[in-house]
Amino acid sequence: MRLALVISAAAVLLAACSGAPRERALQAPPPPPSTTTTTTSSPTPEPQPVVVPAPPCTAAVRACVSLSQNLAWLLKDGAVEYGPVPITHGKPGHETPVGTFKVAWKDAVHTSSIYGLPMPHSVFFAPGGIAFHEGPLTEPSHGCVHLSPEVAKIFFDALPVKAGVQVVA
């Protein structure tokens, strides 16, 4: 916009200074169309309450896993004590079993005898070496329930041997 005004002013000055006869008076160009936009203020939306999914398990278990939601909880007397937390679980061909189980054993520094991979804070609860343990939340497992490092430690500390674990589809 400024450039157009400068060019127009320069043309007027050159025409006035040139000794050439003027047949018509030069006029300043019309102002360019407005580039400002009018905004209509809309009311700020009210914050919506965060809906935390309830665990889909029975009250009798200590840990609950929802495979369809990729979430897990720790329960105490049927009430949520911790969670939900994100998980990953078994991939096709290595599905995490659905059912109600009991924690069989725990190992804080376990390494998989099948895959040779570390399984920190392992809490074994289903046949075939299925456990909660620290693992990537970006990829499925070979049947175990992967938890973040911090959450795996919390589950390890909260789940004693014989504690109930329920896995639902």
Image (tube, grey):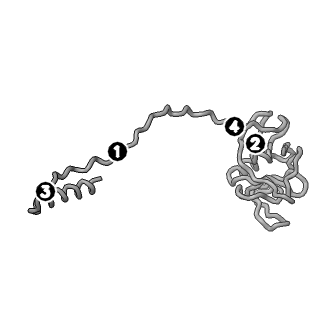
Gap in angstroms between the C-alphas marked 4 and 3? 80 Å
Toward the left, the furthest residue is 19
Q: In front here: 70 or 42?
A: 42
Q: Nearer the viewer, mark 3 or mark 1?
A: 3
Task: Give the number of the disc on residue 34.
Answer: 1
Q: Residues within 10 Å of mark 4 (few under 14, many from 20)?
A: few
List the residue tagged with mark 3.
22
- The first of marks 1 and 2 along the sequence is 1
Gap in angstroms between the C-alphas marked 4 and 2? 11 Å
Gap in angstroms between the C-alphas marked 3 and 1? 32 Å
Q: Is mark 3 on a helix, strand or loop?
A: loop
- The first of marks 3 and 2 along the sequence is 3
Tell me what residue is drawn at x 87 percent, y 45 percent: 162
- The first of marks 4 and 2 along the sequence is 4
Task: Give the number of the disc on residue 52.
Answer: 4
Amino acid type at image mark 1: Ser
Tell me what residue is drawn at x 74 percent, y 50 percent: 87
Gap in angstroms between the C-alphas marked 3 and 2? 88 Å
Q: Nearer the viewer, mark 3 or mark 2?
A: 3
Amino acid type at image mark 2: Trp
Image quarter in which the C terminus is found:
top right
Gap in angstroms between the C-alphas marked 1 and 2? 58 Å
Gap in angstroms between the C-alphas marked 1 and 4? 49 Å
- The first of marks 4 and 3 along the sequence is 3
List the residue tagged with mark 2.
73
Q: In this view, does 8 lie above or below 53?
A: below
Q: Are marks 3 and 1 in contact (CB under 8 Å)?
A: no
Amino acid type at image mark 3: Arg
Q: How crowded is mark 2: few (under 14 residues within 10 Å), some or many (20 or more)?
A: many
